[in-house]
Amino acid sequence: MAYLACKNLTLGYEGRAVLSDISFEVNPGDYLCVVGENGSGKTTLMKTILGLHKPLSGSIAFGDGLKQTEIGYLPQQTAVQRDFPATVREIVLSGCQARAGRRPFYNKEEKLLVQQNLERMSLTGYASRCYRELSGGQQQRVLLARALCATRKMLVLDEPVSGLDPKVTAEMYALIRQLNREDGITIMMISHDVSVALREATHVLHAGENVFFGTREEYLQSPLARRFLIQEGGESA
Amino acid sequence: MMETLAQYFQFPMVRYALIVGVLIALSSSLLGVTLVLRRFSFIGDGLSHVAFGAMAIAGVLRLTEARMLFVMPVTVLSAVLLLRTGKNTKIKGDSAIAMISVGAMALGYLLMNLFPTTTNLSGDVCSTLFGSTSILTLTKAEVWLCIGLSAAVLIIFVLFYNKIFAVTFDEDFARAAGTPVEAFNLLIAVVVAVIIVLAMNLVGSLLISALIIFPAMSAMRVYKSFLSVTICAAAVSVACAVLGLLVSILADTPVGSTIVAADIAAFLIFSLIAKLKK
């Protein structure tokens, strides 16, 4: 059974649809890349899966032992966060809030988990550093460590490399690839960069007027990807 | 100077004033950090105006002893309403708050004029707005009410500290993790309303926002973790309240504005420290 199965999902605000009738599945171990132009409803789709929005119609089902609150979420950074007085440890610890549930304080186990995830993201020396003083790439790794505290199964990443320079971007993608291939964490990532989807993902969901869902190989053969690639190539040339 | 102070402290009402001042300063600064960081500081401002209007109605209804029992629920209810309208897309949050707060103020003043309860109307209005002498006329019951409510605020804050941090830093992430964000926002709004009604005795309704915002802003200049910012804001707020009270007793200045002046001074000092550190 799939971790996540969406059937005939229509999303939007106040009755106006931004994405219509999409169906797809995410299975354990998958690396799904959600591509599409700005405003095609990618972030809305993520938020709906996480339970932050209600879909206009259609169904979302979780299975294979995954609960909705067990998804690790890496949102796009907000202006508030960039200037937030908090240490790296405080932020990563907040990834354990679902684990702690009604318990008011974090326990030893959760603190250990924070330590492990800081190590995993090579942030051990940064635990007491102030978040707002870190570089963009380091901040993203902090938020990734927080997301990893929330899940052992599935990460949902919203444009994880936006605002990062090419070198840090490549490092970030390598890190995500490693989490997927070596640690077996299922990835669902939003990107506006189709070439990334073709390079990194196992599955692609193309959101927009024409919706496509399938494996990377199938996507490569689709007219949608070709048109997108020609456009991209044209722009960069 | 010490002798003068010692003399003053023989009066129970001066001791009450100090206890109440410290407690109010402590509770208002604790929530200040999360309100400032979430760009919610204007909610404090809006609610304080509502509290003024409610106070005016309480005066007209001649609820002298029981006015807290009237003002408190009205302010709490407004807090809930303000939070609701903040999400209403038809009336944007900031305009809704401006409308409610200015409206409450205007109607409050109008009512006080239409149904004057004392001969010294402008004096009454002034003391409701700026605090003035009311803190030195606190009854024992009011002091106990203040102690009880401050203790409640403190316990709520400590118990929900981690959740307050999580919701303040990232509402969406908290919601995705199953944390009842709406319930926490409601709790915070209710607690803020309680603090504002308490603080009206100390600094008056126009100056309450200063107690909420200044200590948090000062602490955020220098400290870098959420915990240290929170502790520092509380310490600064209490220190300024004590200093302001003592100065106002010695120099015979209005209590509320002297405390706020101390808060402003602290903010300038902390800004300077932050500059020097860089």
Image (cartoon, coloured by chain):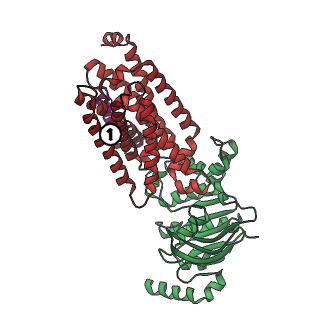
The residue lying toward the viewer, choosing from A93 and B55, is: B55
Does the image show residue B225?
no
Q: Which residue: 45% across, 87% down? A: A234
Q: Which residue: 57% across, 43% down? A: B162
Residue A144, by quadrant, is bottom right
**Mark 1 crowdedness (10 Å alpha carbons): few <14, some 14-19, many ≥20:** few
Q: Amino acid at mark 1?
A: Leu
- Secondary structure found at label 1: helix
Q: Colour of chain A?
A: green
Rendered view: B120 above or below A20: above
Rendered view: B265 above or below A188: above
Rendered view: A8 above or below B252: below
Does the image show residue A33?
yes
Residue A66, by quadrant, is bottom right
Left or right placement of residue A176 versus residue B87 in this view: right
Q: Which residue is mark 1?
A: B272
Report x, y in % for residue B253: 26, 24
Report x, y in % for residue A105: 63, 40
User: What is the chief secondary structure element of the magenta stretch?
Assistant: helix
The residue lying toward the viewer, choosing from A21 and B8, is: A21
The magenta segment: B256-264
Residue A179, by quadrant, is bottom right
Q: Quadrant of the C terminus of chain B?
A: top left
Is A143 covered by the magenta stretch?
Answer: no
Q: Colour of chain B?
A: red
Q: Quadrant of the N terminus of chain B?
A: top left
Report x, y in % for residue B177: 62, 55
